[in-house]
Amino acid sequence: MPSGASASHDIVRSYCFREVVIYFVDGIAVHHYQPATPNGKPPIVMVHGGMHAAWAWDQYGQFLAEKGWDCHALDWYNHGQSTALPEADFIKRSHTDLHREILAVSRQFPAFHLMSHSMGALATLISSTLLNPESLTLFAPVVPAAVGADPVPMEVDLTQLFPVPPFEVAKGMFFSTMTDAEAQTYYAKLQPESSQAVWESARRNVPVNLAAVRAPTLAVAAGADTLTPPPDIKKLANMMDATYLEYPGIGHCELLMKASAWQQVATDVETWLSKL
C-alpha cells in the first residue's frame, strides 16, 4: 500500500499472490492486488467504466499480480465503496471530472501505468494529456470527438441519474455473448450512472488533444461490441500510433469478464506491458 493512504483492516480475499486489500485516498476506495513477488516495475492504476466499479478488474488484478504487477483498481466517486457526492453533483459529472480520482490515486507513485475500460478509458485518455504515465491500455474505449464516430442512439435525461437498463438491454450492451446465468452475475452489480457522462459517451463529443498523449498506448477492441465498435477503436489507435488488438466474438465487457475469453486477452496485454 502506498504511504499516506488509509487502509481497511479487512482482507477481501487471498490467492497465491499476497492478498487484496482496500485502502482509501481522498474518499476513493482502491482495491490493491499485491503480488507475492513484485516484478519491480511501476504499478498499474486501473479505471473502470460506467455503471461498474473496481470489481470489473477482479480477474485482471489477480492475474497480473500473479505475474508480479502491483495493481490498484479504483472506484469512481459514487461507485463501489468510494465517497458518494451529492446526487445533484453526480448527475452532472463529466468524463473530465474523473481526472480527480485518477490524479488522487496515481500521484502516490513516482511512476505508474494506466489501464482502463469504456468510459473510464476516455477519462484516462484525458488524464494522460496532463499526466505522464508509463503506458496507457484502453479496453473498448469510448472514443473522443476527433475520431468522428457515429453517435449511439440513446435517450438521456440530463436532469436525473441514468438508470440501469433492463437485463436484456444491458446484456446486449455489455455481456452480449455470455450465457444469461453468467451475465446475471455481473448485471446484479451494475448501478445508475451520471447522465452527463452517459450523454457524452453516446454523442462521442468529448474533445481530447491526442497529440499531448505521449505514453505508449495499447487499444483493445471486442469484435461483437456495439457500444464501442472496433472500426472506431482502430481509427483511434491509428491516430495515436498505438498498438491495436481485436478479439472476435466477444462483447464490450467480456474482454475483462467472460470466463472463456478474458484470460487470453489478459495474457496478450501482459506480454505487451512486459516488453515496454
Image (cartoon, rainbow, N blue to C red):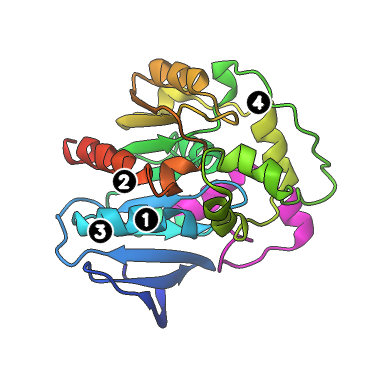
C-alpha separation, residue under disc 4 versus residue under disc 1: 31 Å
Who's the residue at 32% across and 32% down the image? 215
Q: Which picture quadrant has residue 203?
A: top right
C-alpha separation, residue under disc 1 versus residue under disc 3: 10 Å
Residue density around tag 1, few if under 14, some if 14–19, many if 20 or more, within 10 Å: some
Circle 3 SS class: helix
Front label number (1 vs 3): 1
Is label 1 in contact with label 2 (beta carbons under 8 Å)?
yes
Q: Is the residue 28 above or below the residue 194 in the image?
A: below
Residue density around tag 4, few if under 14, some if 14–19, many if 20 or more, within 10 Å: some
Is label 3 in contact with label 2 (beta carbons under 8 Å)?
no
Pick the residue in front: 63 or 166: 166
The residue segment tinted magenta is: 77-103
Front label number (4 vs 2): 2
Q: Is the residue 33 above or below the residue 212 in the image?
A: below
Instruction: Estimate the x, y position of residue 183 in percent, counting from the top left.
Output: 56, 51
First of labels 4, 1 by sequence position: 1
Pick the residue in front: 249 or 122: 249
Who's the residue at 41% across and 51% down the image? 46
Q: Which mark is residue 65?
A: 3
Read off the residue under disc 4: 205
Circle 4 SS class: loop
How many numbered circles does the render carry? 4
Who's the residue at 48% across and 34% down the image? 140
Circle 2 SS class: helix
Q: Which mark is residue 263?
A: 2
User: Quick check: can you spot residue 107?
Assistant: no
First of labels 1, 2 by sequence position: 1
Q: Which mark is residue 112?
A: none
C-alpha separation, residue under disc 3 versus residue under disc 4: 36 Å
